[in-house]
Amino acid sequence: GENVEQHPSTLSVQEGDSAVIKCTYSDSASNYFPWYKQELGKRPQLIIDIRSNVGEKKDQRIAVTLNKTAKHFSLHITETQPEDSAVYFCAASKGGSYIPTFGRGTSLIVHP
Amino acid sequence: GAVVSQHPSRVICKSGTSVKIECRSLDFQATTMFWYRQFPKQSLMLMATSNEGSKATYEQGVEKDKFLINHASLTLSTLTVTSAHPEDSSFYICSATASGAQETQYFGPGTRLLVL
């Protein structure tokens, strides 16, 4: 089955800095890669996703890049703010009705 | 749109009792619902997948007789933790996907279970 590795497990940055979280996956058939943000005690919320037919997608301060050859994808957050502090999960799936496999999560701490 | 609710949000029970958690899709029909378990500072661990009107598919290592799942309608799935023990204490989160958009999972707010 699919195996998703996520790094780092903890990331501490100063407000205004950029943050990068990286994930690798094992199944070359995976073609859908969502990212979720989970604040403490709350539900995970989809913040951005990317499909295998594109290499990059951007939404304001958030961007995701995908390298299918190397089987890795990354989340980039620019101009970080304290409210970006949360746990971020990457996931990979074959799309459609396939269940995504989640990474272990990255705890992002943005210091004011 | 695409709101998933969960009830209760928090429950404390005595060891040996059973606890039922409800997961509802409020504004869409959920083709599939998923049940996850999350320990503190850890990832989401998929427990089972359920489709309306059929038996749930459990992940390896999850006891189907202990974690009973009933998906009676396209908007409701329930998870019953039977004969709960302290080691069952955890954060249980459901999610749902809608037909035509099966890639996107909409998560419920979670239920924190504490077994004394």
Image (cartoon, rainbow, N blue to C red):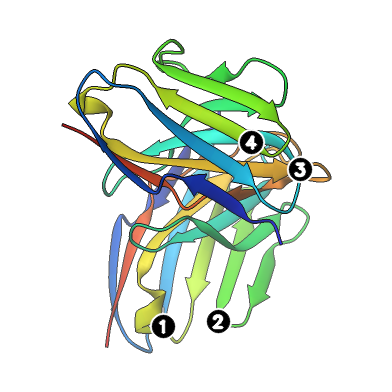
Asked whether disc 2 touches disc 1, contact meaning CB atoms under 8 Å apart, the reply is yes
Say whether residue A30 is left or right of residue B48: right
Indicate which label's residue lies in the foreground, 4 or 1.
4
Query: Which residue lies under the disc numbered 1?
Result: A80
Query: Which residue lies under the disc numbered 3?
Result: B29
Query: Which residue lies under the disc numbered 2?
Result: A61
Asked whether disc 4 touches disc 1, contact meaning CB atoms under 8 Å apart, the reply is no
Asked whether disc 4 touches disc 2, contact meaning CB atoms under 8 Å apart, the reply is no
Viewer-proximal residue, B19 or B63? B19
Amino acid identity at mark 1:
Thr
What crowding class fits label 4: few (fewer than 14 Cα within 10 Å), some (14-19), or many (20 or more)?
A: many
Quadrant housing residue B31: top right
Query: Which residue lies under the disc numbered 4?
Result: B76
Q: SS for tag 2?
A: loop
Look at 55% across and 81% down and name the residue there.
A61
Quadrant housing residue A83: bottom left
Callout 2: chain? A
B96 up-or-down from B47: above or below: below
Tell me residue B111's x, y (percent). Answer: 39, 44
What crowding class fits label 1: few (fewer than 14 Cα within 10 Å), some (14-19), or many (20 or more)?
A: many
Considering the image in quadrants, where does the N terminus of chain B appear?
bottom right
Asked whether disc 3 touches disc 1, contact meaning CB atoms under 8 Å apart, the reply is no
Look at 48% across and 55% down and name the residue there.
A44
> What's the distance in space between the residues labelled 4 and 1, CA to CA?
38 Å
Amino acid identity at mark 4:
Leu
> What's the distance in space between the residues labelled 2 and 1, CA to CA?
8 Å
Indicate which label's residue lies in the foreground, 3 or 1.
3
